[in-house]
Image (tube, grey):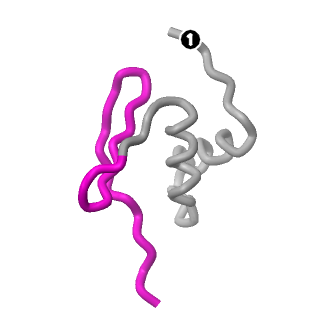
Amino acid sequence: MHETQVGHKHMHTLQQVFQHPATHNLEWHSVVALVRDNGTVHEADHGHLTFTVNGVTEIFRSAHRSPS
């Protein structure tokens, strides 16, 4: 297993993901950038994103903005 250095922005995103209580202002594009820099991101039908990091794959529905 290789060790990855995480930059300041990604470290902030990780802290938001794992903080308790959960944050309500986590930016989806920051999460996607974090995963993309450490694995792969594939966009599928209906806004689903497949994240793969270290051989582990998860599928998420993309966050959408609420209508104005």
| Quarter of the rendering containing residue 64 | bottom left
What amino acid does circle 1 point to? His
User: From what the image shows, is residue 51 above or below residue 27?
Assistant: above
Q: As rendered, which of 25 and 19 lies closer to the eye?
A: 25
Crowding near pointer 1: few (<14 within 10 Å), some, many (20+)? few
Q: Residue furthest bottom?
A: 68
Magenta-tinted stretch:
43-68
Image x and y of residue 9, in percent: 70, 45
Residue lying at 65% horizontally and 41% vertically, measured from the top left: 10
Q: Residue furthest right?
A: 8
Q: Is residue 10 magenta?
A: no
Judging by the rendered image, the residue that carries numbered circle 1 is 2
User: From what the image shows, is residue 29 above or below residue 17?
Assistant: below
Residue lying at 58% horizontally and 52% vertically, measured from the top left: 30
- 64 with respect to 15 (left or right): left
Image x and y of residue 65, in percent: 45, 75
Residue lying at 53% horizontally and 51% vertically, measured from the top left: 20
User: From what the image shows, is residue 15 above or below residue 21?
Assistant: above
Q: As rendered, which of 27 and 49 lies closer to the eye?
A: 49
- 63 with respect to 34 (left or right): left
Image x and y of residue 47, in percent: 32, 59
